[in-house]
Amino acid sequence: MTTYSIDGLEALLGELGVNVPIPSFIESEVLRRPIDIYRSYLADTASKVLECDAYLAYEAIQSANIKDNSDLTLVLPKLKLRSDKPKDLAREAFIKFSSTPLFQLPLPDGVHLRFVFSTSTLPRLILSYIDDRMEQYGRVGLLGDQTKTSANGIPKKAVIEFSSPNLATEFNSSHLRSTILGAQIANLYESAGWDVVRMNFLGDWGKEIGLLGVGWNKFGSEEAFQSNPMGHLYEVYEKISEQFKPEKDASRKARDEGRGTAEIEGKGIFAERDGFSKRMEDGEPDEVNFWKRIRDATIAYYTDTYERLNIKFDEFSGESQVSPESIAEVESVLKEKGIYQESDGSWIIDFSKHGPKSLGVSVLRGRTGSTSYLLRDIAAVLDRNKKYSFDKMVYVVAADQDVHFQKVFQALRYMGHDELATKLEHVSFGKVQGLSQQLGEVHLLSDILDSSIKQMSEALSSDQNDHPGIDNSDKSAEILGITSLIAQYCGSSKRTTGYNIGTKKLVSFEGETGTTLQLCYAKISESDTDEAVLANVDYTHLQDDLWTEVIRVIAQYPDVVDVAFRSHEPSAVLAYLFRLSEELGNCLEEEEEEDDNGEGDNGENGGSGNDNHAADSRDPPEAILAQAVLYKHARQVLKNGMAILGITPVV
């Protein structure tokens, strides 16, 4: 018997003494979220004993806060019950409930009734539920799963744009956080049943590439490029940028003083840069061949390096790939609608004139004829819509680009693409600082990964504690180093919050770090045996508080994933995994204490009281087996959550 289907689930509930069929609610997904089983039965019971609408009761049920020491909360004011003494409403309602196979008696708390799952049925129901799903637990797509993400059996399509570094320039903290959060958000969409396109929109066109081209003509070395393509290109870019800085400063000063910049920008490196980028746009062979070489080298480098982070892109696109047809369409429509206008040789949109005023004025095509990043980004939306017919496109980009995306979305509305604009979302995030202080001088993604792994290797070598399943091998150092980096850049708070990387946290073996997650996973993996299967379990050994707390937490996993998906907050999954590992840690500590108490003298003192105490302190084989089964299923939940975050288990 499996719980894949409603029939199988109801058969199990019947064996547990629960009345069937399961009460039906539109919002309930009992085949994917086990707590929805409890919600459905609680709503049905509440509607009967309190004489209120069942759907109103379902909406009034909330997942309890961790600190509430309960599993579900019934918010009584939402039921619109009549009472002469509203303050006594919870006590009046409390006496109408009785315990059931699924629930203990409720606890009145102000205007709430708090419900705790019955420990007599919880272990078997939840472990059986997870056992039938294992790696699919928490995901949409099981047999009989009534997913809400598809129409006519065809999954919705999401395009997730993230990482998006610029050719040959530094891979900074914002790029790294975009990479990690974007990959996690893409995983969340897949978990929710969407067809996901992972897109890396490279900064591979425009004036910055023109500047790199000027630098290559001055400082480029074929030998150095063949030996270390990305390292040499970065070196060239830094040298030409240093030479260009005085001219940029002079132009900025003139602009700030209200003076024209045409004279400054018409000579020197300004003119060389603009000329190179214009020749690229015109398709001149030398410039295009240079661009193609560095683009190919960059994609090859990043493909290999992203793989170390468990990330693969479906498409390496870029500013260079935007079609001339879509660019022409954007300019033509905007001109036709009176939005696009010429100003001092450039073509602009005056958002302050057409609204909203806060967006100011933006250049779409410069006086030299070159296209701007804004124009290419607007046109890229049209290209992607034609290619993918997406239901949603998400840009995972730092918060300092918020105004840019507002301009993209508004320009599409100007063009009459209101419906298309509603499918776009900028998922912003705050800055993470302290990378250079923590990892030293790093410029490229591979530098960041190598430095993190090196520090983890040093931490493993110097740590005096024994960590079962983890050694000081290169493999362990790489997995742990990357895990810690992912955990740091996912963040323990909401993504919009900026924060500093702790100087010690990256390689810490304590607290809420990626390393502690791996240590917990490795430790509970030790208990796995061939006998650790549900058929051998005596569930009465899992009804104590330590074990039921773990079961309560693993039952919440699908709900946590749903919250993370809806809010685009992968940190919710990370926080959940920390909580689960904490509860598992409590169980492991209890076992260690029992082992310590059981280390008697093995009868050498003639059957002393110590020997009897040791025998009493050890769990019977049936209990040890039940605990091993629980660890096995908790480990699977840890693994599922780690997979969403892009973390590979160390064992």
Image: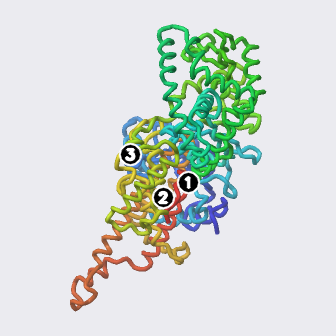
Q: Amino acid at mark 3?
A: Gln
Q: Residues within 10 Å of mark 2 (few under 14, many from 20)?
A: many
Give residue 478's mark: 2
Q: Residues within 10 Å of mark 3 (few under 14, many from 20)?
A: some
Identify the image quadrant of residue 109. top left
User: Looking at the image, which is closer to me, 254 or 603?
Assistant: 254
Q: Which numbered disc flags the more N-terminal residue, 3 or 2?
A: 3
Spot occupied by residue 559 in the image (x, y as percentages of width and height): 53, 49
Q: How far apart in space, not on screen, are marks 1 and 3 (Cα)?
A: 20 Å
Q: Which numbered disc flags the more N-terminal residue, 1 or 3?
A: 1
Identify the residue position indicated by label 3 in the image. 438
Spot occupied by residue 453 in the image (x, y as percentages of width and height): 45, 55
What kind of element bears circle 3?
A: helix
What kind of element bears circle 1?
A: loop
CB contact under 8 Å: marks 1 and 2: yes
Give residue 308's mark: 1
Q: Which residue extends farthest bottom?
A: 606
Q: Residue at x 54, y 40 (%)?
A: 178
Q: Amino acid at mark 1?
A: Arg
Question: In this rendering, would 139 be left or right of 618?
Answer: right
Q: Is residue 278 above or below residue 644?
A: above
What kind of element bears circle 2?
A: helix
Asked which colour scheme the image uses, the reply is rainbow
User: Looking at the image, which is closer to me, 2 or 445?
Assistant: 445
Q: Amino acid at mark 2?
A: Glu
